[in-house]
Image (cartoon, rainbow, N blue to C red):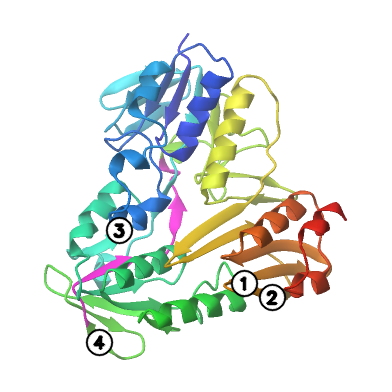
């Protein structure tokens, strides 16, 4: 038996192979990953790891010994270059790997700035891999000047770390406000004020015209007409699903590698999970970029390789750490028409409604609001807005309503 071959060595892959072995899968399991290290957590890279509060071994999702102990063969520092669907083989690192079932956990790649505006200058960084963060870490010295391009969560998290380490931070966001694509104005206002209090210069409605410098970035021309001097830049303008390998193999692509409710691609012997995969959601398709989705989809694919026939039901949740604020998000806010705000000492949450239906919750240092909101959303229940808005009201009884 050729067993299962997994392309990619991130969260989805780690969850998939661990689940396979836990469910009693006994045939060979092989993981092919481009990076030289075992699967690791990505969210702490731009936070605790960059701050020096988390060592490399603590990033690992499983100890290195786990893979040998569970008879999982790792081929690290190998790039899969082709899938031969007819012969059921993957070509990587100059070798061919036969498979009975193939799982694509290729993740996503960060968007980069075009070379025409300085994107290839030395000192221009993205935040995605261990190598990316190791490359930028020596630049985080007190007093250094950094430009952050993009006011999403990646950009804001990088700004928070830089400010905490004493750097001079300018963040530009081309849209009208930070977090415009993912959050309500109330959440944007909260984080704008949080960063301003730490000395971060946030410029909204201001794009980057070009980076300046001969070989190393030395400055930036901005859309507001200003020119600033910088020592380095961090680009956080989103990610795209890594679909090139699947597309070359002739698999269906639709905002990612298209899978059915079971996690199967247009080839029933090939599966996909995590950032790279789009799945059915009602009458539409959805792709989620989150740790929770990678874990859940990886485990789903493992179960279905074992014959479970289980359909995927997404339970979206996300988080972001900035300074001493922990943001926890439950649900998806698409289609909301009003926000209900709940404030308590040191905590705040924003509840998204479409009519009377609760869609999502943004909870800042309010784990109880997050927990209650998440459970309500997953149960298809809502919450009385008047109770939510009353900081003296106990939220837990809402779960029994």
Q: Residue at x 46, y 61 (%)?
A: 321
Residue 56 to residue 385: above or below: above
Would residue 233 be counted in the magenta stretch? yes
Per the model, the C-alpha gap separating discs 3 and 4 is 29 Å
Q: Residue at x 78, y 69 (%)?
A: 393
Question: Which residue ends up furthest to the bottom in the rendered image?
Answer: 225
Q: What is the total number of numbered labels drawn onto the structure image? A: 4
Q: Which residue is mark 4?
A: 227
Per the model, the C-alpha gap separating discs 1 and 3 is 26 Å
Q: Which marked residue is nearer to the observer: mark 3 or mark 4? A: 3
* Marks 4 and 2, the one that precedes in the sequence: 4
Q: Residue at x 52, y 71 (%)?
A: 179
Q: Which residue is mark 3?
A: 51
> Which percent across, then down, holds residue 238?
44, 61
- Kindly state the secondary structure of the residue where label 3 is placed: helix
* Marks 3 and 4, the one that precedes in the sequence: 3
- CB of mark 2 within 8 Å of CB of mark 1? yes
Q: Which residue is mark 1?
A: 348
* Marks 2 and 1, the one that precedes in the sequence: 2
Specify the quadrant of the image occupied by residue 372.
bottom right
């Amino acid at each position: 038996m050729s067993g299962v071959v997994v392309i990619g060595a991130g969260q989805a892959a780690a969850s998939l192979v661990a689940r396979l072995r836990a469910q009693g899968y006994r045939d060979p399991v092989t993981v092919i990953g481009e990076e030289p290290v075992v699967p690791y957590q990505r969210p702490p890279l731009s936070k605790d790891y960059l701050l020096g509060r988390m060592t490399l071994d603590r990033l690992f999702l499983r100890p290195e010994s786990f893979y040998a102990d569970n008879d999982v063969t790792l081929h690290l520092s190998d790039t899969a270059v082709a899938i031969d669907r007819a012969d059921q083989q993957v070509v990587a690192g100059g070798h061919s790997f036969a498979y009975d079932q193939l799982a694509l956990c290729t993740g996503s790649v960060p968007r980069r700035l075009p070379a025409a505006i300085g994107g290839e200058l030395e000192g221009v960084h993205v935040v995605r891999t261990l190598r990316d963060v190791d490359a930028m870490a020596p630049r985080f010295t007190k007093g250094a000047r950094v430009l952050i391009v993009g006011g999403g969560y990646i950009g804001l998290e990088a700004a928070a770390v830089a400010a905490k380490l004493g750097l001079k931070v300018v963040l530009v966001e081309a849209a009208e406000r930070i977090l415009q694509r993912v959050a309500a104005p109330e959440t944007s206002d909260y984080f704008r004020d949080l960063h301003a209090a730490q000395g971060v210069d946030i410029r909204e409605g201001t794009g980057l015209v070009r980076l300046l410098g001969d070989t190393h970035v030395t400055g930036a021309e901005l859309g507001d007409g200003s020119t600033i001097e910088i020592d380095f830049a961090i680009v956080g303008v989103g990610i795209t699903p890594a679909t090139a390998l699947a597309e070359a193999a002739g698999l269906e692509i639709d905002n990612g590698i298209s899978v059915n409710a079971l996690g199967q691609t247009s080839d029933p012997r090939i599966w996909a999970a995590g950032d790279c995969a789009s799945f059915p959601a009602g009458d539409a398709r959805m792709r989620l970029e989150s740790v929770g989705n990678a874990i859940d989809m990886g485990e789903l694919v493992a179960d279905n390789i074992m014959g479970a026939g289980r359909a995927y039901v997404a339970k979206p949740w996300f988080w972001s750490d900035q300074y001493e604020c922990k943001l926890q998000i439950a649900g998806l806010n698409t289609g909301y028409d009003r926000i209900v705000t709940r404030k308590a000492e040191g905590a705040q949450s924003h509840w998204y409604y479409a009519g009377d239906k609760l869609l999502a919750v943004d909870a800042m240092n309010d784990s109880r609001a997050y927990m209650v909101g998440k459970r309500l959303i997953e149960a298809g229940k809502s919450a009385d807005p008047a109770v939510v808005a009353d900081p003296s009201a106990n939220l837990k009884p809402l779960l029994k309503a």
